[in-house]
Amino acid sequence: MENTEGSGPLRDGASSHELPPLFTYITSEGVAGFDTSSSPPGDCTVTQAAINSSNSTCINAGTPIISIPAAHSHNHAHSLSISLPSSPSALNGERIKGVVFSDKTEPKAREVCANNGEGTNASGLPPRKPAKFHSQPMHVGFESVSKFDQNLARKDRLKDNRYNSFKTWSGRLENQLSNLHGKSQDQAQISDLQDREAEILPAVHRYFDALEGPELETLKASEELVLPEDNKWPFLLRFPISSFGMCLGLSSQAMLWKTLSASPSLSFLRLSPVVNLVLWCAATALIALVAAIYSLKIIFFFEAVRREYYHPVRVNFFFAPWVACLFLAIGVPPRVSGDLHHAWWYVLMAPILCLELKIYGQWMSGGQRRLSKVANPSNHMSIVGNFVGALLGASLGIKEGPLFFFAVGLAHYVVLFVTLYQRLPTNETLPKESHPVFFLFIAVPSVACMSWAKITGTFDLGSRIAYFIAMFLYASLAVRINFFRGFRFSLAWWAYTFPMTGAAIATIRYTAEVSNALTKILSIALSTISTIAVSGLLISTVLHAFVFDDLFPNDIAIAITYKKPKSRKNKSLLNRTPSPDANDLEACASKDDAWIQR
């Protein structure tokens, strides 16, 4: 409805250039038939505004009206008023009557309005009283809105061009196809520069300068990232190489329970080999799953994998998948395979040899990645593969190959052990945060004593020396209870469970040579501690994955800049020391406020 009295083409006394208002505020009680259909269809309800108007005529309230004002001499456009029926019942073709009229057809319209007041319609039936229909507000649930926002944010994250620099060739390909999508050349050049900046690998000292923590995974306050810090990155970018630590912990448990069930000195426990079978199958499935996910990361985000490889700590975890497979080969249940083929040993040791040629060469040749600069406890993972491979090769009956890897591992372990103990002034000091990273000191001597015993055929003097070194390091860490308090959960902890398992297996082998009550109790105790540690980590991993949803946070370590940023430092200086002009403005504003209050 439109109030033609107050919103006609020209009000009385108004200027010819004044336009009528587009909307007029009315109440539902002031217009008959609005929001309800209580009036019978025969009543001709006319509003007061329409009665007083001379330019339009009213008809039945239930009938749609199109009112066209009379033409005037000026050239202004006329307003159009449309009144919709108040209920779906008014849409009946027999009862709807539309009238289009002006001042010249006013008598005919009044006649139509009078005819509508009759008690019958065209079909001769009495009119029906229409039902009342009230307009209701539309409620939008918060849950649906939140889901919509989450889906929208997910789509925006997938379309975010800032991740292109870590994709495999996609960033360059999108820049080449930018003109086809209507993207300007300047924007294409800017994105190309950003991609090139992200593709520049940071030097080794940048990882130590920009990151902190036991595994160099926490960004310092003065640093910036090449990826957005506030958004959640794609899953493959957040999936680190340290995820293979879970495979190390579970596969070493399969090896432990096979040794427990087959040890003659612990036969009184009567352990079933079914436990070994279940753990071996679970470890195999876990390795296959983690390897499949990380293979997708290599395919789609190869630049992120490159940054992990050049990380001084992460590079050691590239040995983890092959060491885990060696543990599976050693702990294979008799029901699955009696004797493995020798080819398995060569297949598993070939990638370990290639990684050692690269990393050990960098340690020896010097430069930015010399051992005195990058030495940290995680380097033990690049050493322990030699002794695990020697243990498997000797178990399969291979002679020269296991001895070769044992010699290479022993030479580099001595150098690494002395470097970590000596801590040269050029080294970065070990972080003081409590963390089980130091249990990696136990891994190498524990596995070395077993591999040498397998090579020589007896648990002789050399094996016992290595075993006693491992037990001393284990005891020196165990007595420092405060050393392991207040640490934060990390996925890399799984890699630190296999040294405890290795110590338990070495104790079982020593018990077979020196069988007494003390060695048996020690074997059971260390095996129990190792099993409890792996079980606790398994529960923690499930909770952080499905309850807390923080198992895979943004991988800060791969997104640092190749040089130290300067913008954040300048911003901090500006925030610390306000300019004198700002102080003068604040003082003037306070004086003005005081004068106004007076």
Image (tube, grey):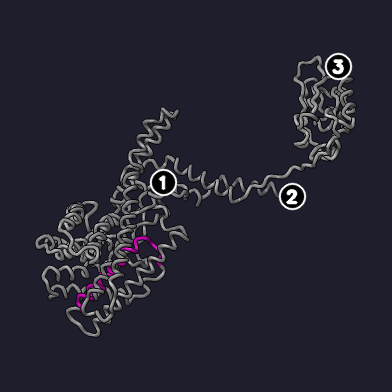
| Residue 113: image location, x then y, percent | 87, 26
**Residue at x 50% of width, y 52% of height:** 576
Q: In whole angstroms, how far apart are the C-alphas of marks 3 and 2?
A: 65 Å
Instruction: Out of 268 and 306, give the one closest to the viewer.
Output: 268
Q: Secondary structure at mark 2?
A: helix
Q: In whole angstroms, how far apart are the C-alphas of marks 3 and 1?
A: 73 Å
Q: Which residue is mark 1?
A: 227
Callout 3 amino acid: Lys
Instruction: Out of 64 and 352, give the one closest to the viewer.
Output: 64
Q: Is residue 365 above or below residue 198?
A: below
Q: How many marks?
A: 3
Q: Which mark is residue 597?
A: 2
Let me know if residue 497 is in the magenta part.
Answer: yes
Q: Secondary structure at mark 3?
A: helix
- The crowd level at tag 3 (other Cα within 10 Å; few <14, some 14-19, many 20+) is few
Q: Is residue 13 above or below residue 1?
A: above
Q: Quadrant of residue 56?
A: top right
Q: Which mark is residue 354?
A: none
Q: Is residue 265 left or right of residue 16?
A: left
**Residue at x 39% of width, y 46% of height:** 565
Callout 1 amino acid: Leu
Tell me which segment is drawn in magenta.
Answer: 487-511
Q: Which mark is residue 104?
A: 3
Instruction: Out of 436 and 536, give the one closest to the viewer.
Output: 536
Q: Secondary structure at mark 1?
A: loop
| Most distant residue in the bottom direction | 517
- The crowd level at tag 1 (other Cα within 10 Å; few <14, some 14-19, many 20+) is some
Q: Is residue 227 left or right of residue 143?
A: left
Q: Earlier in the sequence, mark 2 or mark 1?
A: 1
